[in-house]
Image (spheres, rainbow, N blue to C red):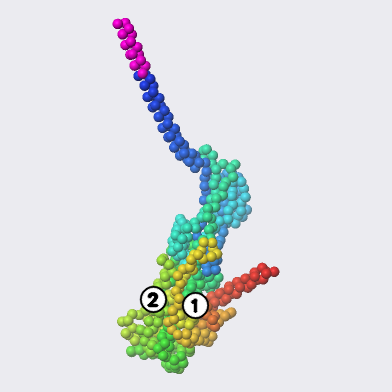
Amino acid sequence: MTKFSDCCQNYSGVMQMGKRALSIYVLLIFMFTGMICRFYLLSVAGDSLASVANNQSTFVLDVDNTRGMIYDCNMKPLVANERKTVAAVLPSPEAYTALTAAARETGDTIEPDTDATRPYTVELKQTEVYSKGIEMFETVQRYSKNQLAPHIIGYLSPDKKDGAAGIELAYNDLLRQYDGNLQVRYTMDAVGRTMTTAVPEIRKNNYRSEGGVVLTLDAEIQRAAQDAMRGVEKGAAVVMDVQTGDLKASVSMPAYDPNNLAASLHDERSPFVNRAFSQYNVGSTFKLVTAAAALESGVGRYAPYLCEGYVDVDGHIFHCHWRNGHGEIDLKKAIEVSCNPFFIHMGQVAGGKRIVSLAREIGFTRAAQFSNDIRTRSGTLPDERELELNTAVANLSFGQGSLTATPIQIAQMICTVANGGFAVTPRLVEGFTENGKDLYEHTLSYHPSQVFSEYISDVLRDTLVANVVDGSGKLAAPSYSTAGGKTASAQTGIYETPGEEDSEIVHAWFAGYVPAEQPKYAIVVLVENGKSGSDVAAPIFKEIADGIYLAQHSGQAEADRTKEDSSI
């Protein structure tokens, strides 16, 4: 019995020991599992904490941001031509002292940020400051003080990241592909203070990339046109390649400052309106279409007409501006003196439908579409019902009535007259570039279509040259070249003072081409309420033509000198 009892006690002891061992084993498993989980959590949190620590140890200061370029047809930049000096300032007594001392010496308006705890930028107008904690940079200013073609280029949104108008808006996605920035990376200590002992790292990420949009505009021609229009309160000027329809210059006055848009917001002259793309009464410039239609219908170039100072059309009297009458005249003389009765007669012979049809073929009533977001107004012509009235045809014949057109369309008309009778399609965008040197893609261009004969073109050119030499366009004669052109004083039927006939708003036009012998450029000038095309618009035409000649010949002379120097 004793042995059996002892055995039972031994078995019980073994069982208790086994339970204790099992408990210890389970406990160890839980401990090791907890440790593994803890190590895993620490490793994950460690990466996050390391990232936070890294972010806290640096500070990145944006100094400048750039976007894609906009070029002229010769790959000359139309934006980002001016530079400005920017200082990246690390807050310190030394930097503050250097900036205030420089401001006193030069009179520059430098305002150091006395409350700054992190690096900041200061634009310097005429000062260069060299001091510990100050880094100097030459940065890019998107728009120049006297920006070329602001109504074409457009402007940016308030945050400067996207285009809000013009080419900037129309090709925003493409221009943003070339976004770049200039940054300075500073090292911070454990409590977030910038370390003055660490040299800041300068980063350039695609900064000042050369990719962008190439326009048909010519910077030198654009500058000549803007200079000639500088005294015009409201108006427009257009220069177009007579063979292709490519826009070489487009000016709208008044202009706005893309660097200070707020200054133009409340200007009653509406500076944001692109008047080169707007429609107006065109007056006597349209007589060229009437003449072409009449010649096409068989009227001879020397066919005589007796101007008695007026003409009666269905009981309605249309007066000539020369009330005594011009006597017997032909087409050339009629252009020179801008005789309304002569062209009313030609219009009645040609017929309103023929005139309107030819006008449409040239481009009237067809808006010029330069991109999805850039287009001109379409203008207006009398409809078929209106053309049933002989008086409406009479009005149309000398450019009055329900006819309106844009300066772009008048330039198309001049191109057609000057190039042998071929209607052109206006174009503004040449293509796109990656490097600012070569085009990787051209935009679509349309082949000109002949709408009247070369003979008619020759006849009209002869009359327009004679008009500049001996007629109403004398003041348009260039100093260095020859030209042909037509004046116009377009009545609007709008009066500044209702009831006072003398207060009618009359637009001044001159539309012509240079040079006379081998036409290259169509030039159109509009001055709102300029009254006289002969006295007001014609001299501006001359100034533009002279400016183009001087710019191109001085440029060629410079190119020749460069070529000679390189050959030595």
The C terminus - image quarter: bottom right
Question: Is residue 8 found inside the magenta-colored segment of the image?
Answer: yes
* Residue placed most toward the observer, 536 or 486: 486
> Residue 182 location in percent, x, y?
54, 53
Q: Residues within 10 Å of mark 1 (few under 14, many from 20)?
A: many
At label 1, which amino acid type do we have? Gln
* Residue plotted at (59% across, 50% down): 135
* Residue plotted at (54% across, 81% down): 518
* SS for dot 2: loop
> Residue 127 location in percent, x, y?
60, 54
At label 2, which amino acid type do we have? Thr
Q: Is residue 485 above or below residue 84?
A: below
> Residue 505 location in percent, x, y?
42, 77
N-terminal label among 1 and 2: 1
> Residue 483 location in percent, x, y?
53, 81
Report if the CB atoms under discs 1 and 2 are less than 8 Å apart. no
Magenta stretch secondary structure, dominant: helix
Q: Which residues are magenta?
A: 1-18
Could you say which quadrant of the image residue 126 lies in? bottom right
* Residue placed most toward the observer, 127 or 178: 178
* Residue placed most toward the observer, 279 or 178: 178
Q: CA distance from mark 1 to mark 2?
A: 21 Å
**Mark 2 lies on residue:** 365
Judged left or right of residue 516, residue 394 is: left
**Mark 1 lies on residue:** 243
Q: Determine which of the numbered discs, if any, sits on residue 419 in the image.
A: none
* SS for dot 1: loop
